[in-house]
Amino acid sequence: MIYYTSTQKEKMQEFGLDAVLQMYFPNNNHWGASVSFRPSFRNDDGIDTVEICRVDYYTWTHYAQIIRFKDESGKDVFEVSELFCGADENEMWIYGEYSSFAYAVRNIAIKGTSENGRKPLRKY
């Protein structure tokens, strides 16, 4: 797993999340991640979105994403989804919600996406 920027890699290592991505997507020549972080003024530092992409030299192609949000009780939820789905490639397909980043990454690595014939739980 490579990162879009060195800052993203450093932050993922700081949060202890890089090891999870490396475990499930270890081939640096084929997988990449682009990460957005929550700003510190929200008093809730951490990841917001991790986009996992297939990498072919300089071309990054969206594969899946993990979006972190808070549920009604304030607990972190990690939603696994994929963009550019449907007949017109204008849908987001949601595959599941997980209680940890590691569970979400593992789910993508094992079950894949629509590319692997996976069906969504819901569409947006």
Image (cartoon, rainbow, N blue to C red):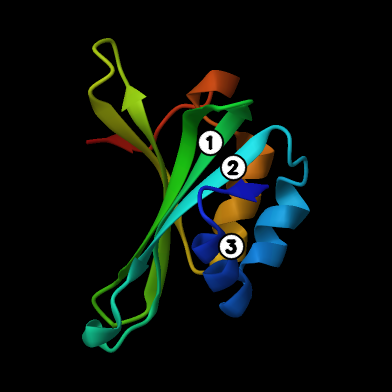
Viewport quadrant of the C terminus: top left
Task: Check disc 3 and give the amino acid type.
Answer: Lys
Label 2 vs label 3: CA separation?
A: 11 Å
Farthest residue, direction bottom: 43
N-term mark: 2 or 3 = 3
Label 3 vs label 1: CA separation?
A: 15 Å
Residue in view at x 33 percent, y 25 percent: 84
- Residues at discs 3 and 1 in contact (Cβ within 8 Å): no
Query: Could you tell me residue 41's position as x and y percent?
Result: 22, 85
Residue in view at x 59 percent, y 42 percent: 32
Crowd around label 3: few <14 · some 14–19 · many ≥20 (10 Å): some
Task: Check disc 1 and give the amino acid type.
Answer: Cys
Q: Nearer the viewer, mark 3 or mark 1?
A: 3
Using the image, determine if residue 104 lies above or below residue 81: below
N-term mark: 3 or 1 = 3
Secondary structure under tag 2 reads strand
Query: Could you tell me residue 89's position as x and y percent?
Result: 28, 18
Q: Is residue 91 left or right of residue 83?
A: left
Query: Could you tell me residue 11's position as x and y percent?
Result: 53, 72
Query: Could you tell me residue 75's position as x and y percent?
Result: 37, 79
Task: Check disc 2 and give the amino acid type.
Answer: Gly
Q: Which residue is mark 1?
A: 53
Work out whether residue 80 can be spotted.
Answer: yes
Label 1 vs label 2: CA separation?
A: 5 Å
N-term mark: 1 or 2 = 2
Q: Which residue is mark 3?
A: 9
Q: Is residue 6 left or right of residue 48?
A: right
